[in-house]
């Protein structure tokens, strides 16, 4: 686990290795989601359905908090959320009591909402990055245009100075001849 994580940090991201790094990260996050999905089963055996209600609130809170850090890439968030809530919701349905089945249904209703939120965050960040790239390109073009205008202005000032000097010289010669 650490080897995969730390080895991927040492290698710089390039176009060639981007897909491999993304796949590794998604596998790692999916395993983490499955691990978190198993926690309720380990901590609270299936025999105690009353313990699942506070745990459902904690897991929903964890997923809502994870959208802030993983929501920037909706596929990564889905890789975490689906195994995480899948195991939890299935556990609720397996218990089959009148209290746990609605909690399982609520979890299944919560997942699409959170995935939609992650997709919106992902799209918003992508649009923001596109705008930033466009602004950077515009800044480069404006800087080049400003340099061209300044160079042209210097040339015009130089030409005006030369003409004024030539006119002054011509006026001076006319005064000398007169």
Image (tube, helix red, strand yellow):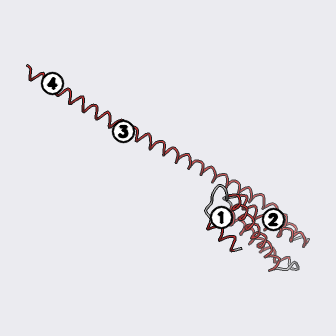
Badge number at residue 107: 2
Q: Distance from label 2 to label 3 (Cα)? A: 66 Å
Q: Is residue 130 above or below residue 21?
A: above
Which residue position holds label 3?
151
Tell me the CA gap for discs 3 and 1: 48 Å
Q: Give the secondary structure at mark 1.
A: helix
Relative to 128, 71 lies left or right: right
Q: Residue at x 61, y 68 (%)?
A: 10
| Residue 170 on image: x %, y % | 17, 24
* Few, some or many residues within 10 Å of mark 1 (<14, 14–19, 20+): few
Which element is circle 2 on?
helix
176 left or right of 158? left
Mark 4–mark 3 CB contact (< 8 Å)? no
**In the rendered view of the protein, which quadrant contains the C terminus?**
top left
What separation in Å lies between label 4 and label 1 (alpha carbons)? 77 Å
Placement of 30 over or under 142, stated as above or below? below
Check disc 3 and report its element: helix, strand or loop.
helix
**Left or right: residue 73 compared with residue 45:** left
Which residue bears the numbered disc 1?
Answer: 69
Which tag is nearer the camera, tag 4 or tag 1? 4
| Label pair 4/2, CB-CB below 8 angstroms | no
Coordinates of residue 39 in the picture (x, y in percent): 78, 76
Q: Residue drawn 40% across and 38% down?
A: 148
Q: Residues within 10 Å of mark 2 (few under 14, many from 20)?
A: many
Few, some or many C-alpha atoms within 10 Å of disc 3 (few <14, some 14-19, many ≥20)? few
Up the image or down, 136 lies above or below 84; here it is above
Name the front one of labels 4 and 2: 4
Q: Which is closer to the viewer, label 3 or label 1?
A: 3
Does label 4 or label 3 sit earlier along the sequence? 3
């Amino acid at each position: 686990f650490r080897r995969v994580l730390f080895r991927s940090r040492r290698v710089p991201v390039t176009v060639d290795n981007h897909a491999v790094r993304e796949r590794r990260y998604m596998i790692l996050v999916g395993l983490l989601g499955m691990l978190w999905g198993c926690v309720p089963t380990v901590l609270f055996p299936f025999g105690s359905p009353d313990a699942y209600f506070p745990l459902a609130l904690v897991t929903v809170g964890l997923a809502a908090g994870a959208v802030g850090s993983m929501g920037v890439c909706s596929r990564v968030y889905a890789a975490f959320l689906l195994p995480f809530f899948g195991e939890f919701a299935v556990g609720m349905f397996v218990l089959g009591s009148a209290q746990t089945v609605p909690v399982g249904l609520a979890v299944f209703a919560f997942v699409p909402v959170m995935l939609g939120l992650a997709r919106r965050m992902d799209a918003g960040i992508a649009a923001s990055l596109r705008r930033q790239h466009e602004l950077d390109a515009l800044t480069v073009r404006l800087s080049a245009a400003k340099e061209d205008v300044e160079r042209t202005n210097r040339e015009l000032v130089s030409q005006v100075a030369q003409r004024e000097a030539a006119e002054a010289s011509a006026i001076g010669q006319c005064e000398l001849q007169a």
